[in-house]
Image (cartoon, rainbow, N blue to C red):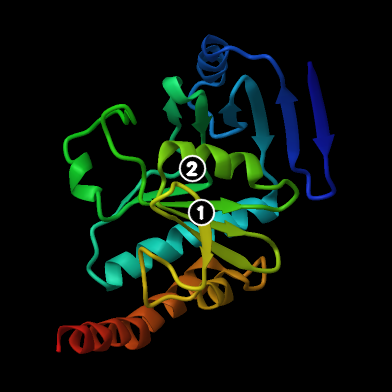
Amino acid sequence: MASATKHKARDTRIDLLDVSWSGFKRMLKVRGERRSPRIWYLDGSLTLVSPSMPHELFAERFGTFVQEVTLGLDRPCIPLGSVTLARSGMGAAVEPDKSFYLDHAEDLRGTTELDLEVNPPPDLIIEVVVTHGAKQAMTIYRRLGVPEVWVCTRKRLRIFLRGADGRYEESETSGAFPSLKASEIFSWIDQPPLMLMNDWQSRLRAWVRDELAPRVRGEERRDGE
């Protein structure tokens, strides 16, 4: 059984019910190496999402933002984009908008194929929500043990940190980047939609160098006293 919804922003979502894990794997094979549609799977429910232009603009800015911050702060980072995250025993799989290994970046050294039965999940996931909710994806991330998820709508960014009980709690600041607040991150993402990326990225790089990096060094010195 399937239903499809198309929105003004041209996001398209198709939901399929009663799909087996092998059916999910066949869908991945049929789609091949194409980026779209992205596929989520949870307890027999399979969702296909084709993102719109506004969605992709936000997602690309987030990817650049995190990489500029890690570069400026000299943090290890392995960006894996929309890599398929799946665990058959948990009946859960998802392809996020952006995914990053930060604290566990060294654990992936030499890895050519991600296997969450062996490898840890990404340290940071980013979900951009334009016309669909993130509830299903958050359930999947909780099962997979992802420690931090950023959920961004057109109006704000929300940061969720996974607690010891496995539940997500909203946080004003990032766990991966404690010096960054959700509102500050969003102020960089929420720029005119057709701003040239190189102009935006140049300003971001200067801000990381001149403001964020000195702030982080100052906080580290205070913590070490």
Image height of 179 relative to 189, above or below = below
Q: Residue at x 23, y 58 (%)?
A: 76
Quadrant hosting residue 211: bottom left
Could you classify mark 2 by the number of other residues whose Cα lies within 10 Å: few (under 14), some (14-19), or many (20 or more)? some
Q: Amino acid at mark 2?
A: Arg
Q: Is 158 left or right of 149, judged from the image as shown?
A: right
Q: Residue 22: give its label.
A: none
Q: Nearer the viewer, residue 166 or 211?
A: 166
Image quadrant holding the N terminus, namely top right
Residue designated by label 1? 168
Which residue is nearer to you in this view: 146 or 218? Answer: 146
Q: Residue furthest front?
A: 165
Q: Does residue 217 sit above or below 136 in this rendering?
A: below
Tag 2–tag 1 contact (CB < 8 Å): yes
* Residue sitting at x 38%, y 43%: 80
Q: Measured from the top left, where is residue 193 in percent x and y?
A: 67, 66
Side of 66 where 197 appears, left or right: right
Location of the C terminus (image quadrant): bottom left
Kind of residue indicated by mark 1: Tyr
Whole-percent x, y for residue 19 in the image: 64, 14
At horizontal 59% and vertical 23% (from top left) the residue drawn is 43
| Relative to 219, residue 67 above or below | above
Secondary structure under the numbered disc 2 in the rendered image: helix
- Decide which of 151, 209 is in the foreground and name it: 151
Indicate the position of residue 57 as horizontal and vertical percent values.
61, 57
Left/right of residue 144 with respect to residue 21 in the rendered view: left
Separation (CA) of disc 2 from disc 1: 7 Å
| Earlier residue among tags 2 and 1 | 2
Q: Which residue is mark 2?
A: 142
